[in-house]
Image: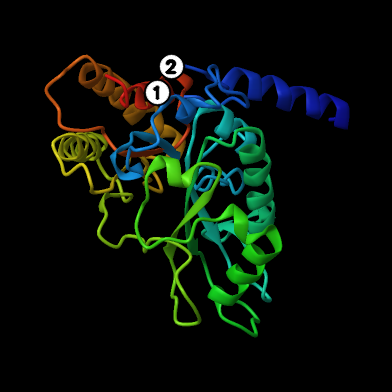
């Protein structure tokens, strides 16, 4: 089979398999964009009280069906309205390449931050929450993971980061990156709030039954909506089973249910606060929009 024919066949197969629905999207571009939705919210709101769309394993594009979790590149995620990132760095020879498990994702922490700064320069009233954790096995390092993060942050510029031990108000956070720190701070002050810290988190990522997974997602949505306005709630709709549920398969099941659930909650006035941070694989444009709208209704 000649190389041009192989490429054409691959493109045809990719086009057939690509699907863009209101709640699920494995295509390259989101159907809806809302790059400046935070600009419409008042400064006094605590970030912990907001409904925020997020992505699980934000940069996981490579490694096959069990490793890939997203199809929108980072810039397009921001344009779609994503404001929570899940960034996994391997500590490798004092550098911080992005990994998902054993799979290298062909980029690094520096590039993630550069793209984020580019976005915040264009939309200075937005903010980005960034969970940062060490992934996979460290290899041939001469310093701590903390010091490697500190070097990258210093090179990007401290002015782009809001160092705080708890989530501030939206006004205080505009134009800034807030690191949710899932690594040790023995070598210096915290970069941001500890993760998980005092946050309420639902992240049942080992899934053997999609219905059980959905019931847990739904339960935690309701916990957040009825919860403390000063507490941070994070719900992961994502998960995996090596045979039954690769991330894309599970997202096709869970995302539509989340979309319908949020639509019903958005039409209800009997709730104390928003649904909190919703962290997804392969989100659809309408699902992202329903999360954002949860801040107003």
Quadrant of the rendering where the N terminus is positioned = top right
Q: Is residue 40 left or right of residue 117?
A: left
**263 or 126: which is nearer to us?**
126
Quarter holding residue 185: bottom left
Q: Residues within 10 Å of mark 1 (few under 14, many from 20)?
A: many
Residue at 71% x, 64% y is 155
Q: Foreground residue, 202 or 39? A: 39
Compared across the picture, whether 234 is left or right of 140 comes to left
Q: Eyeballing the image, is 269 above or below 123?
A: above
Left or right: where 133 falls relative to 239:
right
The earlier-in-sequence mark between 2 and 1 is 2
Residue 96 appears in the figure: no
Q: Residue furthest bottom?
A: 142
* Residue at position x 44%, y 24% in the image: 40
In the rendered image, the vertical position of residue 137 relative to residue 251, given as above or below: below
Q: Position of residue 161 (x, y in %)?
A: 55, 56
* Residue 142 percent across, percent down from the top left: 65, 85
Q: How many marks?
A: 2
Instruction: Indicate the secondary structure of the residue bearing disc 1.
Output: helix
Location of mark 2 (residue)? 22
Residue 70, relative to residue 204: is it above or below? Answer: above
Left or right side of 49 for 140: right
Residue at 66% over, 59% down? 157
**Whole-Å distance between the Cαs marked 2 and 1?**
6 Å
Say which residue appears at 52% left-offset and 22% top-offset. Answer: 34
Check whether the beta carbons of the residues at disc 2 and disc 1 lie within 8 A of each other: yes
Query: Which mark, by number, is residue 133?
Result: none
Please give the label number shown on residue 287.
1
């Amino acid at each position: 089979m000649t190389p041009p024919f192989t490429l054409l066949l691959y493109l045809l197969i990719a086009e057939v398999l690509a699907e863009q629905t209101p709640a699920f999207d494995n295509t390259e571009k989101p159907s809806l964009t809302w790059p400046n939705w935070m600009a419409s919210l008042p400064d006094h709101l605590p970030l912990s009280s907001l409904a925020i769309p997020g992505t699980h394993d934000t940069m996981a594009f490579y490694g096959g069906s069990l490793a890939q979790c997203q199809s929108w590149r980072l810039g397009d995620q921001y344009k779609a309205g994503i404001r929570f990132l899940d960034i996994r760095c391997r500590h490798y020879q004092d550098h911080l390449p992005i990994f998902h498990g054993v799979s290298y994702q062909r980029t690094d922490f520096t590039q993630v931050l550069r793209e984020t700064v580019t976005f915040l320069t264009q939309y200075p009233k937005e903010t980005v929450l960034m969970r940062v954790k060490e992934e996979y096995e460290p290899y041939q390092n001469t310093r701590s993971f903390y010091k490697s993060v500190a070097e990258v942050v210093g090179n990007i510029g401290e002015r782009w980061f809001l160092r705080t031990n708890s989530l501030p108000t939206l006004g205080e956070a505009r134009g800034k990156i807030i690191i949710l720190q899932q690594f040790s701070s023995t070598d210096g002050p915290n970069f941001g709030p500890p993760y998980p810290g005092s946050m309420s988190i639902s992240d049942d990522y080992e899934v053997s039954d999609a219905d059980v997974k959905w019931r847990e997602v739904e339960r935690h949505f309701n916990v957040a909506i009825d919860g403390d306005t000063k507490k941070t709630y994070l719900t992961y709709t994502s998960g995996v089973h090596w045979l039954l549920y690769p991330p894309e398969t599970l997202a096709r099941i869970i995302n539509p249910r989340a979309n319908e659930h949020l639509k019903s909650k958005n039409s209800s006035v009997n709730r104390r606060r928003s649904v909190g941070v919703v962290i997804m694989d392969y989100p659809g444009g309408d699902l992202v929009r329903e999360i954002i709208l949860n801040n107003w209704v």
